[in-house]
Amino acid sequence: MGMLKIENLSAEIDGKTILNGISLEVPAGEIHAVMGPNGSGKSTLSYVLAGREGYEVTGGSATFHGQDLLALDPEERAAAGLFLAFQYPVELPGVGNANFLRTALNAIRKTRGEPELDAMQFLKIARERMKALSMPEDMLKRGVNVGFSGGEKKRNEVLQMALLRPQLAILDETDSGLDIDALKIVADGVNAQRAPDFSALIITHYQRLLDYIIPDRVHVLVKGRIVKSGGPELAHALEKEGYASVQEAA
Amino acid sequence: MNAVAGAAGFSHRFEGLRSRLPGAKLPWLDALRGEAAESFGAQGFPTRRVEAWKYTDLNPLGHVSFDEPLTLLDGGVTLPPAIAPRVVFVDGRFREDLSDHPGARSLARHLPELEGRLGVLAQPAREPMAGLNTMLFEDGLLLEIGEGVDGGVMELLSYATACERPQAFHPRHLIRLAPGASLTLIETATGAARARYLHNPVYEIEVAEGARLTHGRLQQEAREAWHLSTVYARVAAGGVYDNFTLNAGGKLARNEIHTALTGARAQCHMNGAQLLVDGQHADTTTALDHAAPDCSSRQTYKTVLSGKSRGVFQGKILVRQAAQKTDGYQMNQALLLSPDAEIDSKPQLEIYADDVKCSHGATVGELDADQLFYLRARGIPESEAKAMLVEAFLQEAVESVAEETLRGALARAVDGWWRAEAAA
């Protein structure tokens, strides 16, 4: 059974239809990529799944382990095991990164019935994970994403994923703004999560991240619907031929 | 006579009590009270037509008739836990039995020594509430820290008991730090849950050469109280006056601070937070007088408003011609948590010196939807996420508080406000 099952999902923002009947299923343990040109609805898909306000679902459904995802608050979705790595991670001046990460981790642990971590326990875990992502330790002391470079912000997203250990990670254009070294670090971070109960939906415009995170399936999103699905080779074909051919098909 | 409401009620009371008020036999004090009574009698409570009171309406006070507090001499009160050696005033009266700070002295018992000191800074004709205080004060804290002495941390607790009828008290606090002295004074103003009262304190503060006063004020009055306070501070050369005011309690509260930097290189920090829930009105009004060269001042005020509450910030910086090389900064920011809340903000600069650095700013905003979503997407429940963002908003003002006891008391106060707010 699919961990994430999207059926005929339609959504609009300010009366404008963005998602136009998407159907997509991500089985447990698989990594799927959603590729598409600008304006095809990629980010809207990730926001609708994560529960951001301002989007109106006008039809269809999205379930996560059989549970109606769209009926849950964003924090309930996170507690259920869904994680969105933001395309544009939000800056939180005045909120320390360590405090933020620990609060989030403890909120998730609480819903799992696990004991909360005190500051020392948390720091030990955080330092290990940060080392793996080549993140300087002083990023814990700074405000969340404040003064971070583009690459640091994306690494901070992957750090959060590594700490929260979601079952489904949606990576929204995580490759944008990354140089090749940072891209490899981020890909390693995602690959390290690979497990029979971990799935990921990688949303991207370009194929290059998929050189490092090999997807099981690739879906092409155009004008709010999936127009083509295939194996990893589809990403390469798109890279060569561009989106023009599939756009015509839509 | 008690049935007479409003300003006239206070004027009547003064006429009746004049010969029995503390220090009534001291001609200088009786004259001081008489003049104050004359100007208060003529003006009454300020109306909104007075520029300084444009946003805070005292009209409701005019319909209340206040009683003199009953003198409680012992027992009968449960005070909040002490945060430092303290001086306790209950219903405006000094309580030696509840005070444990060795430097605690009652102003009323030392009035004959205070000629030429009491009333030097206060401006009863200009500030009607200081006029009312001058007219009717009965007691207050008299505190002097000797030359070069570190006075440590002291708590000034002002507690109001519940009474059947509203009561009013007007304590007069006189504080002097001799050259090189230092002190942290933390005032907690609070009262029994159902108490209805007017607390109208006036502070006259002298910070001598090189002295340093950290003055924390936690205004957490009972929900039905009126708190109208006026602080006058004068800072001599190289002295530092550091004021942090939390304006969180009461039905209507105004904290008015007049600070004059009269010696070269004097410094002043005036920071504060106003945390308001439905039905509250809070006003912070500051007036900073740069009268000497090379002085610096920093002001950061943050207001968080929920429900149908109203906040006011008025801040005036005057830089006199002599005050060259002044470095002045003022920022006030408001966070509106509800569409029914209102903030009025009026910064004012008046500069007569030509070589100064002076800046001010004001912002008004709501919680950022993107920030809130980001936190919730990480599993943090909405109320906790909001609390984190409110705390972040307040951080800049709160982190200006370096003294640990005050910072701790402040953190508890903010936490208490948020829990009350979340429960509402």
Image (spheres, coloured by chain):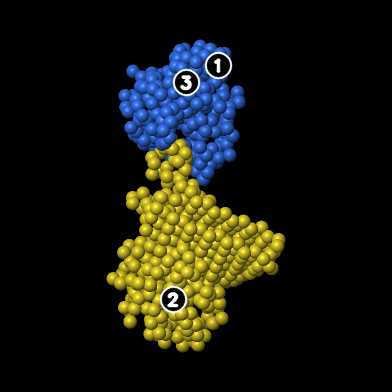
Q: Quadrant of residue B328?
A: bottom right
Indicate the amino acid at tag 1. Gly
Identity of the residue drawn at 39% across and 62% down: B250
Q: Is residue A162 visible?
A: no
Q: So how many labels did they put on this image?
A: 3
- Label the yellow chain with its letter: B
Q: Chain of mark 2?
A: B
Residue B220: give x, y in percent of width and height. 41, 61
Q: Nearer the viewer, residue B362 or B212?
A: B362
Q: Which residue is mark 1?
A: A242
Secondary structure state at the residue bearing disc 3:
strand
Secondary structure of the residue carrying tag 1 is loop
The amino acid sitting under disc 3 is Val
- Say whether marks 1 and 3 touch (CB < 8 Å): no
C-alpha gap between disc 1 and disc 3: 12 Å
Do pointers 1 and 3 mark residues of a single chain?
yes
